[in-house]
Image (tube, grey):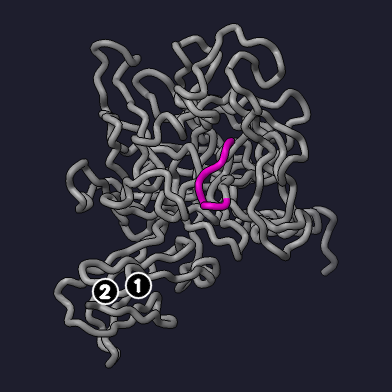
Amino acid sequence: MKPTSTTLLAVLVGLGLSQTAQAQTTNPAITKFLRNTTNVRARHYVSGNATPIQDTVHANVQRVRYSATSVYINATGIPAYVIGPYLDGNPSLGTNRNYLFKLPLTPRPNTGTAMAVGMGTTGVLINGVPTYNYADGMSYNNGGVWHQNAVVFERAGFDCAKGHPSPVFLGPPGPGATLVGGSYHHHQNPSAFNIATVPLSTVCNIYLADGLYVPDSTRHGPLIGFAFDGYPIYGGYGYATPLAAGAIKRMVPSFRKRNISARTTLPNGTTASQVGPTLAAQPLGSYYEDYEQVSGLGDLDEHNGRFCVTPEYPQGTYAYFATIDRDGNSVFPYMLGPTYYGVVETSNFPVMGPGAGSTSVVINEPVTTYSPVATAVNKAAAAAKLTVYPNPTHDVLVVQTTLSSAVAQPVDLLDLTGRVVAHQTLNPGSTMCYFDTQTLHTGVYLVRVNGGSTVQVVVE
């Protein structure tokens, strides 16, 4: 029977909805978040104890839902990698913040005045941990002119993974306010301090942790999160040619330290209303105003991003990059620049007062829960490099990959007969696990991840 026009319209609409649903479930803003499907629990260090404490809070992302236009992410804000301690006297600990974030599935450039990247949350990593901008909220002598760089001033309080919590109070902060928790976050590239060739902190020497990924100069940086305008944030390496996959290079920002001998002028050349501290007292780079943006200086623009192709967006997208230097240390402006590139979903910003740390996001439209088909291992993790250290070892053996997997990966320690003598798991959102080798006999052993090829290690 020949279909009527009404029937044909219904068929076409049905096909359109089906194609839209299929496109949505391949959108990286839906598929790339690390969902905790195996009850992975958070862990933290306390000062003076090098053994992580197991927590009850679940790590990573708990649920991902999407509509035709948006994706909604429920997360505790706590990663799978070990966090803490905070050796600068920070009284708070990272606690479950019960986040609900909202991102546009089709980000739009802002054609008007660019929105400033302010204090507090600016985006969310794929493990549900918020990103912050460069600032710690303080200025020189409270003058509001020379704004402190948190990556410099708060370095002593960052844990091995370069994160820390901001205090959450019951009621407005101030005398008599009750501390009820902490919002764990990253101001900078979420890789451990000790991956750098010249580490800027020794905290990993005692409180070893990993991070979301390990920068690899031979591969495009992984997709590590999304800004609140919906555009992706990548690790520190990208394609040398923006619109073609190929050679890899480190992404260089277009910001640089100013050539000044005294803090008397601002980056725009005007005289500062307050003279800043001497460079002997606070080295250049300690304040936001120590930097200037020079168009075309590096690979990235004033937002710390560019339009380019990436492994997840082969047709091209605007993307931010978590910039690092040649040694692997974070470089200003770290993730996002002073302004967003796109139109921002402002309901993600923190609610002040008793609800501090939460968001204003409300789901008032039909949504579908994302439930991916389970696979043995995701492609990115399969391509990751495997490192074991120290080798030879005596007390402990660290197994680390360059990329975290979306699923748990079994890690086996075998003797040369193929017998498994110890077993660990690489949890989603973590790149590292440990073996206690003190009780093993001296000899040669093999490390095997997810049943794949092996790496030889010597136990002394």
User: Judging from the image, what secondary structure is the residue with disc 2 in?
Assistant: strand
Instruction: Please indicate, yes or no, whether residue 26 appears anywhere in the rendered image.
Output: yes
Query: Which residue is disc 2 drawn over?
Result: 423
Examine the image and state in which quarter residue 313 appears: bottom right
Q: Quadrant of the C terminus?
A: bottom left
Between 24 and 403, the residue placed more toward the observer is 403
Q: Position of residue 181 (x, y in %)?
A: 29, 30
The location of residue 388, given as percent across then percent down, is 37, 70
Residue type for callout 1 = Pro
Q: Which residue is mark 1?
A: 410
Do the CB atoms of the residues marked 1 and 2 lie less than 8 Å apart?
A: yes
Q: Of residues 450 and 297, which is closer to you in this image? A: 297
Give the residues drawn in magenta, as a range. 326-332
> Does residue 66 appear left or right of residue 5 in this picture?
left
| Comes first in the chain, label 1 or label 2 | 1
Rendered residue at 42%/64% (across/down) = 407
Residue 146 percent location from the top left of the image: 54, 17
Does dot 1 land on a helix, a strand or a loop?
strand
Given residues 397 and 371, the one toward you in this image is 397
Image quadrant of residue 436?
bottom left
| Magenta stretch holds residue 388 | no
**Is 313 situated above or below 450?**
above
Residue depicted at x 39% and y 65%: 400
Tell whether 25 sits left or right of 283.
Answer: right
Kindly identify the residue that appears in the image at 47 percent across and 56 percent down. Answer: 213
Q: Is residue 165 placed above or below 454 in the rendered structure?
A: above
